[in-house]
Image (cartoon, rainbow, N blue to C red):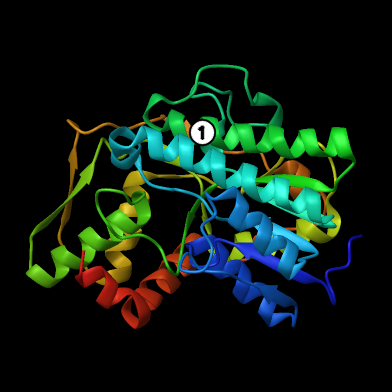
Amino acid sequence: MFALAGKKIWVAGHRGMVGAALVRRLARDGHRVLTAGRETLDLMRQAEVEAFVAAQRPEVVVIAAARVGGIAANAARPVDFLHDNLLIEANIMRAAADAGVAKLLFLGSSCIYPREAPQPIVEDALLTGPLEATNQWYAIAKIAGIKLAEAYRRQYGLDFISAMPTNLYGPGDNYDLESSHVIPALLRKAIEARDSGAATMTVWGSGTPLREFMHVDDLADALVFLLEHYSADAHINVGTGQEVTIAAVAQTIADTVGFKGDLLFDRSRPDGTPRKLMDSQRLLAMGWAPRISLRAGLADAYAHFIESDRARFAAL
């Protein structure tokens, strides 16, 4: 058991969807949270990161900062997704090690696993086959982060751990169709179709791929649990253990926002991996479990969009 109470916790990437959810979760429990925006700290500048950590002396660090995006963004900017993420994770881990940080949690992504990994995907599937080509640049950077955290444990005995979240959605999501993931993209499409009175809404692909989705607030809860209860070389999967077709997700989103038209599936668009479900039994066996169902989570994401994201969405 690692006690978070009374410790200063730096959440790097606090303005992103995951970082913001974690800050909310930690603040709810009264923890001391440290943040720094891009205007004051460039995570890709090693000297700036080292100076910040040396001055602020966080006792716990969570690396939620990353260059993220969907298939189109990965294809258009491979250097950004590989180079920038390598710098962010390497700079923060080095500074944390030098400052004697008590615990560090690195966040990866389910895309680290081979495209044809057996399903559900166990942690040991890492580096057993070729990656999905559409997001390989991001995946390689995240794999390097996992191995770097493991290396710090082995060489210096530091309590650095890594967690691999499944597909996420929720408050603060990205609604830019050029760089967003499937749920925010479908939510935006459904709202636009409803507001325009359209008879149909187009969904990329056949609608048959199976995916696992987790509300970001469930992830934040899991991360706090792991900070307190997990310490090992191996990374650990964080998922719900439940999967659903893209067609079913699209219909649930349409129902949520009140779009009454038909769904059209554009089979000229790529489906991506036919199935992606992570095996989260190691985490679930430790006593943690998700609380938010997909239907309830989508309703929450839509409500938050109406309250907080609509102005940002309108500018896209």
Where does residue 94 sit, x and y in percent of width and height? 71, 45
Q: Establish if 114 lies above or below 87.
A: above
Q: Report whether 34 appears left or right of 226.
A: left
Where does residue 174 sit, x and y in percent of width and height? 36, 60
Q: Is residue 165 visible?
A: no
Q: Quadrant of the C terminus?
A: bottom left
Question: Circle 1: is it few (<14), some (14-19), or many (20+) Cα within 10 Å?
Answer: many
Q: Report whether 255 appears left or right of 279.
A: left
152 or 271: nearer the viewer = 152
Q: Quadrant of the N terminus?
A: bottom right
48 or 63: nearer the viewer = 48
Where does residue 48 sit, x and y in percent of width and height? 59, 57
**Residue, disc 1:** 139
Q: Is residue 190 visible?
A: yes
- Residue at image position (56%, 16%) is 129
Location of residue 154 (image quadrant): top right
Q: Establish if 5 lies above or below 96.
A: below
Location of residue 186 (image quadrant): bottom left
160 or 256: nearer the viewer = 160
Q: How many marks?
A: 1
Q: Residue furthest top?
A: 129
Where does residue 45 sit, x and y in percent of width and height? 54, 50
Secondary element at image label 1: helix
- Residue at image position (85%, 75%) is 5
Q: Report whether 193 appears left or right of 215.
A: left
Q: Report whether 79 appears left or right of 60.
A: left
What amino acid is found at the position of numbered circle 1 in the picture?
Ala
139 or 303: nearer the viewer = 139
- Residue at image position (82%, 72%) is 7
